[in-house]
Image (tube, rainbow, N blue to C red):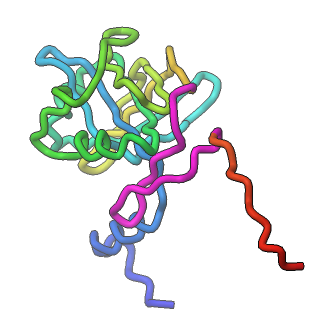
């Protein structure tokens, strides 16, 4: 086992490398602001509590969408399906026109942008913005949602997107090899 570093001295590269080993679901988070819709790709989506229904995600205070999220009363989280790798990449790209073509979206509950084709989505009322280093943890109470979108999950692991099989897809019959 490698030596343990003293508290507070862990190299940022080591920290990022550890979390690259953690497979995470991929979500796009959106909000509506005075200048229009804003959104970003997140792997930090977490269920916080069931009663009341709370979820959280992290957003960098250095991101271009932070001003919109810092003032938003409502946000939407979209759990992306395996078919949405391009959407994940678009919303992760700095300077991209995230809500232009080919993105298909419409205003949802409380005016938040809802992306078409997500595996699932929630709209939440922002309950807290918790300081956490150069990020804020947004805690929101779910007020609307739909878990019935298409496809299996999209995952992020080791710096790349990955797909799991769609659990609702029929399992192909296996052929017998004739061996006993």
- Residue 15 pos. (x, y %): 35, 69
| Residues shaded magenta | 148-168
The overriding secondary structure of the stretch rendered in magenta is loop
Query: In the drawing, does residue 65 fall left or right of residue 41?
Result: left
**Which of these two is toward me, 112 or 10?**
112
Q: Residue furthest right?
A: 180
Query: In the drawing, does residue 52 fall left or right of residue 84?
Result: right
Q: Is residue 94 above or below residue 123?
A: below
- Residue 44 pos. (x, y %): 41, 46
**Residue at 19% from the left image edge and 33% from the top image edge:** 98
Q: Please tell me whether residue 57 belongs to the stretch shown in magenta.
A: no
**Residue at 51% from the left image edge and 32% from the top image edge:** 150
- Asked whether the viewer can see residue 131, the reply is no
Q: Please tell me whether residue 152 belongs to the stretch shown in magenta.
A: yes
**Residue at 51% from the left image edge and 90% from the top image edge:** 1
Query: In the drawing, does residue 16 fall left or right of residue 3?
Result: left
């Amino acid at each position: 086992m490698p030596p343990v570093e003293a508290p507070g001295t862990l190299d940022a590269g080591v920290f990022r490398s550890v979390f690259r080993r953690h497979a995470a679901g991929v979500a796009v988070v959106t909000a509506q602001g005075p200048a229009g819709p804003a959104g970003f790709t997140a792997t930090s989506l977490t269920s916080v509590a069931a009663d009341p229904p709370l979820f959280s995600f992290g957003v960098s205070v250095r991101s271009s969408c932070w001003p919109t999220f810092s003032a938003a009363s409502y946000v939407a989280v979209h759990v992306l399906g395996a078919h949405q790798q391009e959407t994940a990449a678009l919303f992760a790209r700095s300077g991209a026109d995230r809500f232009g073509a080919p993105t298909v979206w419409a205003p949802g509950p409380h005016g938040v942008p809802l992306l078409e084709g997500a595996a699932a989505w929630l709209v939440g009322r922002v309950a807290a913005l918790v300081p956490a280093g150069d990020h804020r943890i947004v805690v929101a109470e779910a007020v609307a949602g739909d878990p019935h979108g298409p496809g299996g999950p999209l995952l992020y692991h080791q710096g790349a997107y990955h797909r799991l099989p769609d659990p609702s897809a029929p399992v192909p019959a296996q052929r017998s090899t004739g061996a006993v």
